[in-house]
Amino acid sequence: MPEAVNIVGLIEEVCLRTTQDLSNDTRRLRQACYAALSLWLQTIRSRLGLSSIVERLVPHLLQDIEPVGATTVQLASSRNGSTMPHKDRIKVEDSFNLESCAQLCENALKALQSLVSAPGAIMKPETVQEIQCSLVTLLVRLQQPGNPLPQPYRSPRCRRALYALLLSLAASRNGPPPLHCCARLFNVGLKDSCYEVVELCSQALSCLSLHPQGSG
């Protein structure tokens, strides 16, 4: 496909050039970038043009699934001008920024899942291990009892996408994480307050019991 290199190159350029910008407009651009990457992998089901850039994209994807603090949200809010009264503007901007962060995180998780599930060895084993380590560490942090969930993981969509990525890693032939580790994380996920998250974790546990890792 002659357009493959150009399309993938554009995705890479947008991603790499917007890393340091926390404005809402840039978040929306990155959301679209990650959505395009997922759609490309799911539709074309080809590694065309991706092999040379995946290693550069993954660190940015991992960065965008990390929990964000209040400082990050406030900084993003301060970069968007408005004529609304100060108190009302803060409420609207905070709500918008949190939704924007959640959408960016969800899209980044789905893009990682698409990369993990792509046919063939699209990533180096070290890169897969990096994703696994980041994901398991993040889930362990989020599952600590007594601690309120950080943003954007108060959004059920982000939590569901996080467990979906873990399931894809567990089903991968490319060095999946240990079965007992995945099972423990999914078991804790059964206690989630969101039905969709609980349902996915239940299905994941069934998949792990029926299909040994690496067997396809």
Image: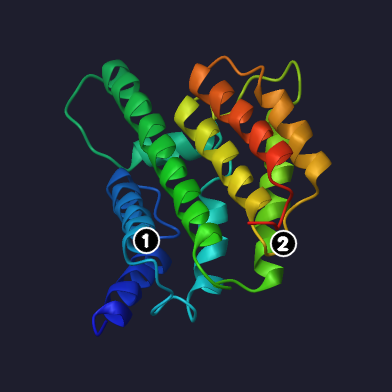
Q: At numbered mark 1, what does the secondary structure look like: helix, strand or loop?
A: helix
Q: Which disc is residue 129 wearing?
A: 2
* Amino acid beneath label 2: Gln
Q: Is residue 142 left or right of residue 73?
A: right
Q: Position of residue 164 (x, y in %)?
A: 55, 40
Q: Is residue 125 above or below residue 25?
A: below
Task: Tell me the quarter of the picture where residue 157 sits.
Answer: top left
Q: Is residue 174 above or below residue 21?
A: below
Identify the residue at image location x=51%, y=55%.
112
How far apart in space, not on screen, are marks 1 and 2 (Cα)? 21 Å
Q: Position of residue 132 (x, y in %)?
A: 69, 53
Identify the residue at image location x=31%, y=16%.
87
For the N terminus, the quadrant is bottom left
Depth check: give the residue in front, 209 or 183.
209
Q: Which disc is residue 168 wearing?
A: none
Identify the residue at image location x=57%, y=62%.
59
Q: Is residue 56 above or below residue 155?
A: below
Q: Which residue is denoted by mark 1 in the rendering?
A: 37
Q: Is residue 81 above or below residue 189?
A: below
